[in-house]
Amino acid sequence: MKRKGLLIILSSPSGAGKSTLARRLMAWDQSLRFSVSATTRAPRPGEEDGREYYFRSRPEFEAMVEAGEMLEHAEVFGNLYGSPRSPVEAAMAEGRDTIFDIDWQGGQQIRNSALGRDVVSIFVLPPSIAELERRLRSRAQDSDEVIAGRMAKSEAEISHWAEYDYVLINEDIDRAESELKTILTAERMRRDRQPDLAEFVRGLNREFAAR
């Protein structure tokens, strides 16, 4: 039976594992699509429009916001970022789910949008703050100054955990992945997400009547 696609919001402080979980979820179900953001920053070497980002000028981006074509948007370090609405609506119509790897502010905007009824929001917590810092340092990608900044931001991000439908504690990535799959499977089976279910039951009743 057909169903509408879901908007799956994954949020967490940096280092808690949301990006890894998103990749694993998409490997598990290849019908899932990842929301490609639009940005006003210039493309970096090797990046392609529509793959890493939709690259737009500031006037183009602002026009999209004014026309209601962004589900969420924000300015970060002088550049605008946002989630275009039309690809998400097209996926929903096809029964495909879209994953958003965004912060609590972006998630709040999407939950408050016209598509809010189809949102499933999940916040990923680390097992401890010490483990969160260990994971950030184990990447060996950032300076001590950058890591300190990420850790300082984490406290504010974690304070929004109660705004989400589900909360996962990512102590073990395999277990967190299993829990995430369980959430998605259950949400897909909700009665109000299966528009053809009423007609199916009417068919069963017609069979009763014909006996």
Image: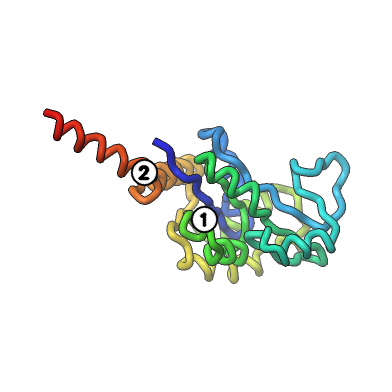
**Residue nearer the viewer, 68 or 52:** 68
**Residue at (43, 59) in percent of width and height:** 165
Q: Position of residue 54 (x, y in %)?
A: 77, 49
**Residue nearer the viewer, 27 or 209:** 209
Quadrant assignment, res 189: top left
Q: Which residue is mark 1?
A: 124
Q: Position of residue 97 (x, y in %)?
A: 53, 44
Is residue 133 in sight in this rendering? no
The three-letter amino acid code for the residue at tag 2 is Met
Mark 2: give few (<14), some (14-19) or many (20+) Cα within 10 Å: few
Q: Is residue 15 left or right of residue 82?
A: left
**Residue at (53, 58) in percent of width and height:** 115
Q: Which residue is mark 2?
A: 189
Q: Is residue 103 left or right of residue 187?
A: right
Q: Is residue 210 above or below residue 15?
A: above
- State the residue lying farthest toward the left: 211
**Residue at (54, 62) in percent of width and height:** 114
Quadrant assignment, res 167: bottom left
Q: Position of residue 18 (x, y in %)?
A: 57, 50
* Label 2 element class: loop
Quadrant assignment, res 142: bottom right
Q: Which numbered tag is attached to residue 96?
A: none
**Residue at (35, 48) in percent of width and height:** 190
**Residue nearer the viewer, 135 or 79:** 79
Q: Is residue 175 above or below residue 79?
A: above
**Residue nearer the viewer, 121 or 208:** 208
The three-letter amino acid code for the residue at tag 1 is Val
Mark 1: give few (<14), some (14-19) or many (20+) Cα within 10 Å: many
